[in-house]
C-alpha cells in the first residue's frame, strides 16, 4: 500500500525536528518497531540508508521493505544488544503491545542516541471524547482492516486497548531507566489527527455526522491549545553527562566519593527500624 507523504503528519514533523536539530544523520543505524509500509516510505523520502523495520507479523518476507532490512521482533523483548542502533522509532505501535511501558524501555535500551515515539496523548479532550462515546477505548477498527485475524494486541485478532500517554509518565520512565545521566532530554511535538478512517468505518449515519461536526472546532482548539491534541511525538535524547555524584574511571562508572564527602555526612547511618515490644 502506498501512502502520500503528508507534511502535516506527526511522522514528518518528528523526522524534520530531528534533522533540523542535527540529532540524526542519514547514515545513522535506525530500528523501527511495530513497523510497516508507512515507516518505509517516510524514511525513503528523507533519504535514510541504514534502516531495519521490525514487527510481530509472521506473514512478512525478508525483502518486504527493500532496500531496507526486515527483522521479526517483539517490541517487548527485542533481541538486540544495548545501544546497538543509533535511533529506535515507533509510530502508533506501542498501544498494540500487552506491556507498552516495557516496549518503551526496550526502545530506549537499544537506541544509543535515543528513541522517537509517535503515539496518542491522554488529554482532557480525549477523556471527554471517550465519555461521549465519540472516541474508542479499544481499537476494533484495526482488526477490521486485517480480515478479523490480525492487527490487534500483539498483532492478534483481539482488539487492543488504546493506551494514551502523558508527559509525566514518559519522563518518569526515562529518568528511572537512565539515572546515571543528568542531561537526558525529551522533546515534545503535538499534532491533531482527525479520525477520518474511523468515521468511514462506522455504520451509524448519525454518529458520522456528530463526529464530523467536531472537526472544525477541534482544529481551532488544537491551534490554541496544542497539548490538547490527540497525538504527539516524544523524542527521548539519551544523556551523555554523568551525574555529579558519579564518575567514569577506566570507562567504568563508579561513585564520586569526593563529591559526596563535600555535600553529605558520609558517617551518617540510617537508624535501624526495630519492632516495638
Image (spheres, rainbow, N blue to C red):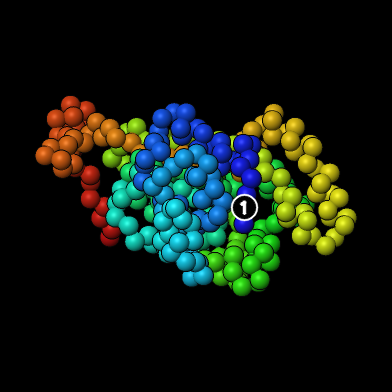
User: What is the tally of numbered marks visible in this picture?
Assistant: 1
Snapshot quadrant of residue 62: bottom left
Identify the residue at horizontal 58%, vertical 41% (top origin). Answer: 10
* In this picture, residue 268 sits left or right of residue 37: left
Identify the residue at horizontal 36%, vertical 41% (top origin). Answer: 28
Does residue 135 lie above or below 265 as drawn?
below
Q: Which residue is mark 1?
A: 2
| Kind of element beneath mark 1 | loop
Q: Residue furthest left?
A: 250
Q: Is residue 170 visible to the viewer in this orientation of the structure?
A: no
Q: Position of residue 67 (x, y in %)?
A: 44, 53
Q: Is residue 205 visible to the viewer in this orientation of the structure?
A: yes
Does residue 190 lie above or below 69 as drawn?
above
Position of the N terminus by quadrant = bottom right
Q: Position of residue 211 (x, y in %)?
A: 80, 49
Identify the residue at horizontal 62%, vertical 49% (top origin). Answer: 3
Does residue 238 lie above or below 263 as drawn?
below
Label 1: few (<14), some (14–19) or many (≥20) C-alpha neighbours in 10 Å: few
Does residue 57 lie above or below 249 as drawn?
below
Q: Which one is nearer the viewer's eye here, 61 or 140?
A: 61
Q: Which one is nearer the viewer's eye here, 147 or 66?
A: 66
Q: Which one is nearer the viewer's eye here, 20 or 82?
A: 20
Snapshot quadrant of residue 230: top right
Q: Position of residue 54 (x, y in %)?
A: 45, 58
Identify the residue at horizontal 25%, vertical 55% (top origin). Answer: 274
Q: Position of residue 21 (x, y in %)?
A: 44, 28
Amino acid at each position: 500500500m502506498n501512502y502520500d507523504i503528508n507534511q502535516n503528519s506527526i511522522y514528518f514533523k518528528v523526522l524534520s525536528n530531528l534533522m533540523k536539530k542535527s540529532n540524526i544523520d542519514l547514515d545513522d543505524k535506525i530500528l523501527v518497531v511495530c513497523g510497516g509500509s508507512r515507516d518505509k516510505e517516510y524514511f525513503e523520502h528523507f533519504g535514510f540508508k541504514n534502516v531495519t523495520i521490525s514487527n510481530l507479523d509472521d506473514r512478512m518476507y525478508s525483502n518486504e521493505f527493500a532496500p531496507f532490512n526486515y527483522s521479526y521482533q517483539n517490541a517487548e523483548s527485542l533481541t538486540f544488544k544495548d545501544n546497538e542502533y543509533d535511533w529506535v522509532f515507533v509510530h502508533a505501535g506501542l498501544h498494540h503491545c500487552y506491556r507498552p511501558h516495557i516496549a518503551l524501555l526496550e526502545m530506549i535500551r537499544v537506541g544509543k542516541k535515543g528513541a522517537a515515539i509517535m503515539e496518542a496523548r491522554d488529554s482532557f479532550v480525549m477523556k471527554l471524547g471517550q465519555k461521549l462515546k465519540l472516541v474508542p477505548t479499544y481499537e476494533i477498527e484495526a482488526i477490521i482492516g486485517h480480515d478479523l485475524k490480525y492487527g490487534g494486541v500483539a498483532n492478534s485478532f483481539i482488539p487492543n486497548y488504546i493506551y494514551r500517554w502523558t508527559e509525566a509518565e514518559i519522563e518518569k520512565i526515562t529518568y528511572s531507566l537512565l539515572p546515571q545521566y543528568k542531561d537526558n532530554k525529551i522533546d515534545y511535538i503535538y499534532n491533531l489527527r482527525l479520525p477520518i478512517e474511523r468515521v468511514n468505518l462506522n455504520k451509524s449515519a448519525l454518529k458520522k455526522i456528530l463526529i464530523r461536526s467536531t472537526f472544525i472546532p477541534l482544529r481551532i482548539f488544537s491551534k490554541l491549545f496544542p497539548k490538547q491534541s490527540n497525538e504527539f511525538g516524544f523524542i527521548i535524547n539519551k544523556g551523555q553527562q554523568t551525574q555529579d555524584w558519579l564518575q567514569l574511571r577506566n570507562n567504568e562508572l563508579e561513585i564520586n566519593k569526593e563529591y559526596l564527602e563535600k555535600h553529605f555526612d558520609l558517617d551518617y547511618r540510617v537508624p535501624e527500624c526495630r519492632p516495638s515490644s
